[in-house]
Amino acid sequence: MIGTYLLVAIVVLALIFVKMTIVIIPQSETKIIERLGKYYATLKPGINLILPFIDRAKDIVALKSGRYTYTNSIDLREQVYDFDRQNVITKDNIQMQINALLYFQIVDPFKAVYEINNLPNAIEKLTQTTLRNIIGEMELDQTLTSRDTINTKLRGVLDDATNKWGIKVNRVELQDIIPPSSVLNAMEKQMQAERDKRATILTSEGDKQAQILKSEGEKAATINRAEADKQQAILRAEGEATARIRKAEAEAIAIQKITEAVGQSTNPANYLLAQKYIMMLEQVASGDKTKTVFLPYESSNLMGSIGGIKELFKGE
């Protein structure tokens, strides 16, 4: 009976010893093994064998859920630290709050364990100090518009400083840059003033274009009217010239007819002049008032010429 209990105890102890001897490491993790207090090995993913009670995994500090905890597993994947907001002062003495995201990866577990006591805290303090130094060299306007520049400078400084800790800083991102409320109000007023200025400029430009278009339209209308008047005057003048030519041609024909009718006995010019006298006398006589008309002596001769010409036409 006692032998059976002893055998069971030996089997149980053997199982416990085997369990303590076999260490299974997940992918992307590792453990630092110390043998009798001295570094012995860095375990790789998979099955590893250690000596129970002689070998033990080294504990390190890790940041999980915003709290520092001790663990003997080292995560080799890229990790992100979200640091709390901190107060920084710009070159022009403006105090504001900034918080940053830090993406880093442990590339040398040995250095991460033995070169620094509290790795997350050291990274946080280094990030805060470096960020204050970088912001302190820039004015407020540069800080608000040069986020990429700040990220690049911060990443470069942190990567160089954490290299001796076995850390690779892959990326740094500034989340929030919050100036004081007075500065925010001033910036808002400035932006509103800029918007009003742009609106005024656009309105004035629109009015200017409208006036230009209006003046160009009026100019075109004036030119068109002038061209129309010019064409009308030309046509009127051409019409009058044509009428005068036709009238002159008709008078020439009439004179020719008179000349042929009277022959050489009477001057045709006297006949035409006498006709003008008669037309004038008819206009004077058609008035509503009594008039006395004195005819020059030469008129009687003209009248006689007309009578002679009429007699000739009757004879024909």
Image (cartoon, rainbow, N blue to C red):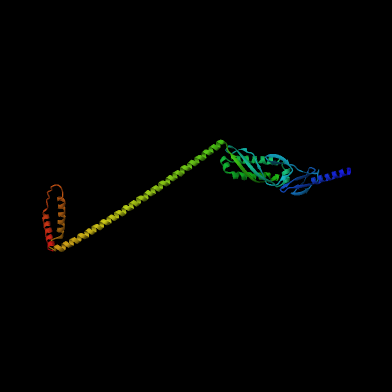
Q: Nearer the viewer, residue 86 or 20?
A: 20
Query: Relative to residue 99, is residue 14 drawn left or right?
Result: right
Looking at the image, residue 264 lies above or below residue 166: below
Query: Relative to residue 184, is residue 310 drawn left or right?
Result: left
| Residue 205, x across and y down, in percent | 44, 45
Residue 117 seen anywhere in this rendered image of the structure: no
Query: Relative to residue 247, is residue 179 drawn left or right?
Result: right
Q: Nearer the viewer, residue 227 or 166?
A: 227
Residue 113 seen anywhere in this rendered image of the structure: yes
Q: Quadrant of the N terminus?
A: top right
| Residue 220, x across and y down, in percent | 37, 51
| Residue 183, x across and y down, in percent | 55, 37
| Residue 65, x across and y down, in percent | 68, 40
Query: Which picture quadrant has residue 39?
Result: top right
Query: Relative to residue 280, is residue 239 drawn left or right?
Result: right
Q: How many marks?
A: 0
Q: Farthest top residue?
A: 182
Q: Quadrant of the C terminus?
A: bottom left
Q: Nearer the viewer, residue 247 or 16?
A: 16
Residue, x 23% and y 59% (percent of image)?
246
